[in-house]
Amino acid sequence: MAAAAGEPEVIRDKAAMRAWSRRQRAEGKTVVLVPTMGFLHEGHLSLVSAAAAVPGPVAVVVSIYVNPSQFAPTEDLATYPSDLAGDLRKLASTGAVHAVFNPPDLYHRGAAVSGRRAEAPAGAAASSCLEAGGDGHETWIRVERLEKGLCGASRPVFFRGVATVVAKLFNVVEPDVAMFGKKDYQQWRLICRMVRDLDFAVEIIGSEIVREADGLAMSSRNVHLSPEEREKALSISRSLLNARTAALNNSNSASEHIKDQIVQTLTEAGGRVDYVEIVEQESLVPVETIDRPVVICVAAWFGKVRLIDNIEIHIQS
Amino acid sequence: MAAAAGEPEVIRDKAAMRAWSRRQRAEGKTVVLVPTMGFLHEGHLSLVSAAAAVPGPVAVVVSIYVNPSQFAPTEDLATYPSDLAGDLRKLASTGAVHAVFNPPDLYHRGAAVSGRRAEAPAGAAASSCLEAGGDGHETWIRVERLEKGLCGASRPVFFRGVATVVAKLFNVVEPDVAMFGKKDYQQWRLICRMVRDLDFAVEIIGSEIVREADGLAMSSRNVHLSPEEREKALSISRSLLNARTAALNNSNSASEHIKDQIVQTLTEAGGRVDYVEIVEQESLVPVETIDRPVVICVAAWFGKVRLIDNIEIHIQS
């Protein structure tokens, strides 16, 4: 556990951020990064606590950056909530954050090349809220198997944007350790795979989901739920807990049966299901029977808000 | 210029390589990486000289690794020449190389997941000599605009493999500076763009083409040319030099005319042209008239050997 950090230093420049990290490491500290998109809640603060609990002297950096490249043009970038002043207050109150990295932008935007704009590449399948063209950003990291399925099926640019911005943050902050919440389960597993495949010198720690007292998984998007929608959304955690109980009480449960029950619960509550999947914990390959460690992943709409949640089931094969 | 380095240390393990680099940096040295696929010639050794000439105390690392992921299954991975003992002798004789990184493999291969192999992702367009599947390597870096055109048109997996292996080498070796030869012009520009877009803390230095006395650009693949093919292949450098003279003597030359003359020269010499293109030096966008700094890029087959070459023309717009 580190000494109290007091007021975190706010850094907005990439070079200054890297220099800060290198100074910390030269002083023998482990640099721990907590990447966020801001509008912080108890889930984020639990990541900060876990960061501060990394053994030895640590320098904890929280990045706050709403990454445009992980949003499709049809998605909610424009309405994604933000409250930088509130975030800084919350982080200062933890006494565990040494720096906040809050860059105005992380990408090269598409200035014209030699007085004209280059064409978008032919066959470019994906497009995001990051403007591309000219000599703008054009380098993308794809984790080709894990980015498909689950959230990747309905959000084709999402994980391309996540993997790319996380790689950029790793190259700017140069952390020794980075914290990811298991609420974004597919994201966590995908980042682990990217780190392995590209040999990033970063240890990834996955942190448990933090829930409201009534079971709702914490999310910055919860603020957009009406009181009625919020009540209905409790069907997510309730159905996941019931599914786990059923799977633990019956060996070799059929996934199809468990999934059907979750879909029924969500639908009866007034939700619109995006997906319910039961998959292996590391590979995210769907299983037919629950006879090994799995995770049940859910995405569902309540009103205009898309929520995700999941529950791990530690059955040994 | 660094002090004489003597016999370079040969490092085969990723973790040992990273630890070596970090020790060098802690001692105040600039770590300079020269990535190669081995079978070294004077072109590579000129990169080593340029690396040693980086200002201040330097630690020069030459990596030797034939990267399977940049070869298509139809290409010449199996016959790519190698001579590790000779390479080590040449590097030792420079007195400028401190370490050689020669890993047996850089990739995670596709071990089965939970007793079976995962399917290759649907719609996976590209496939290389790197076996994929199971929990094998699945993370790829694409520089989406620069990877198309020129060599990318006939070698669709090439730059995906190059960008990915270079990122891995950067993450393992953690160099401050990396040297690339301008003979692989598109590769050099693409790596510069990847470094900019992903915020790698690596300065890229492009080094001039080294030619045989008769003009042939040095390449490890030249060894596969018969004496007759080698003679015919001189048409490449000859036609590029003539093209540059023509462009410098006539303002606003039409690219089409210049390209036609090169194609004619190569064809008459018995070569089979893959492409001849005149493009802007940084964006690699084709130009219609030579009224700004451009590079003429050529790829042509002589017998079973595909050769590339290029020439920069520094006309100011």
Image: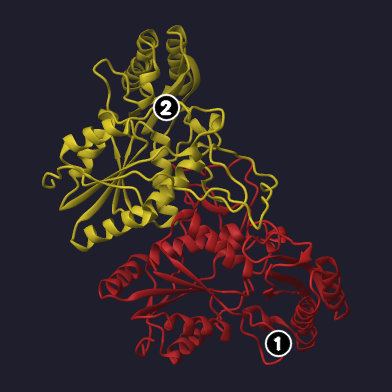
Chain colours: A yellow, B red
- The alpha-carbon separation of the residues under discs 2 and 1 comes to 62 Å
The residue positioned 47% from the left and 10% from the top of the image is A267
Horizontally, is A22 left or right of B285 in the view?
A: left
Is B145 situated left or right of A56 in this image?
right
Q: In this view, does A252 lie above or below B222?
A: above
A15 relative to A240, above or below: below
Mark number displayed over residue B215: 1
Viewer-proximal residue among A194 and B266: B266
Circle 1 marks a residue in which chain? B
Say what amino acid the circle numbered 2 marks: Cys
Which circle marks residue A297 in the picture?
2
Q: Percent position (x, y) of residue A99? A: 25, 47
In this rendered view, identify the residue nearer to me: B45 or B11.
Answer: B45
Q: What element carries label 2?
A: strand
Looking at the image, how many numbered discs can be counted on the residues?
A: 2
Residue A154 at x, y percent in the picture: 55, 29
